[in-house]
Image (tube, rainbow, N blue to C red):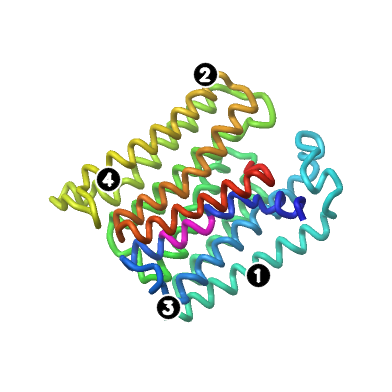
Amino acid sequence: MLAWLRLVRLPNLATAAADPLAGFLVCSRLADIGQLPAAGWVAVLAGVAFYAAGMVLNDVYDLDLDRAERPERPLPSGSIAPARALAAGNLLLAVAGASACAAAVMASTPWPALVAAALTAAIWLYDRHAKGTVFGPAVMGSCRGLNWLLGMTAAGGPTAAEEWAIPVGMGIYVAGITLFARDEAGQIRRGTLVTGGLVMVAGLITAAGFVWLPLLDGVTRVATVPATSWLVYWSILAVAVLIRAGQAVEHPEPGRVRGAVGNAIMAIITFDAVLVLAACGEGPAIVVIMLLAWFLFGRRLVPPT
């Protein structure tokens, strides 16, 4: 069981749940998560299944490389047969697609199903072709942005420029994480780490456009706090992530890079919760940030990277 949990990256599944949940809440502006309709929960299920499928198929297609660089992983170590993993990955993709279609029916809009089709293509493109290329981080980032859109479209959005800033910004942020992590198993290049960190910064600034774009038009408050106070919260979280990344840049060792990557992934849940805070208030934000417990518990069982 631990081998399967490692294969699907158990801790990171919490971030895959947080994105569509936060996306639905941001677009619906629900102040009480107890009123979240079935379409929202099914979109969350689709997001988790898509992420798990992507991780499983990633390791299936990387089997030869992992035999050389990461022989401890479940497939090269022999803990799980590659054929079983391939079947499980395809089954998870089918569950994800069916769930997204169910969300589309429940929400009376085709967009969750169309987003799911795009996400399926992006997962296949990354795992099979783009991973080792210069386009790999961008494709991985698009998967994160599309996962946000699963929830947003199930709620009838996004409908405004500031709402679009979130999936675009979080996609850029994850592209930066992917670039930062590119050399974690090989010869680490400081220049790649610096570039990845800068891309992460660009993504966080873009996602914060959910608040600073309306601020330019004179909207001075979010759901429960002044917009300027919210931007301070966001900046503190961003600095905390970047400090850890900076330590890896200063001492480019595999352990430090993996630690910075794991920290940046975990922070996705916190960023999602703060975005929900801006749209819906404290109650829904607390529910989202409680997903950190899933991440932290899962990290004690299996590594997130």
User: What amino acid does circle 3 point to?
Assistant: Ala
What's the residue type where badge 4 is placed?
Answer: Trp
Residue 146 point in image, percent of width and height: 48, 58
Give the Cα separation between the discs numbered 1 and 2: 43 Å
Q: Is residue 86 magenta?
A: no
Sequence-wise first label, 4 or 3? 3
Question: For the point 40% across and 65% down, which residue is it?
Answer: 24
In this view of the protein, which residue sits in the foreground, 129 or 40?
Answer: 40
Mark 2 or 4 closer to N-term? 4
Q: Quadrant of residue 230?
A: top left
Compare marks 1 and 4 and give the one earlier in the sequence: 1
Q: Which residue is mark 2?
A: 250
Q: Amino acid at mark 2?
A: Glu
Pick out the residue farthest to the top.
250
Q: Secondary structure at mark 3?
A: helix
Give the label, 1 or 2, closer to the camera. 2
Image position, residue 72 (x, y; %): 79, 39
The quarter of the picture where the N terminus appears is bottom right
Determine contact: label 1, label 4, CB under 8 Å: no
Disc 3 marks which residue?
107
Mark 1 Cα within 10 Å, few/some/many (few <14, many 20+)?
A: some
Calculate the distance from the C-alpha at mark 2 to the C-alpha at mark 4: 30 Å
Which residue is disc 4 drawn over? 230
Q: Are marks 1 and 2 in contact (CB under 8 Å)?
A: no
Q: Nearer the viewer, residue 28 or 32?
A: 32
Q: Which mark is residue 94?
A: 1
What is the secondary structure assignment of the residue under circle 1? helix
When the figure is inspected, residue 65 is found, relative to residue 290, above or below; the finding is above
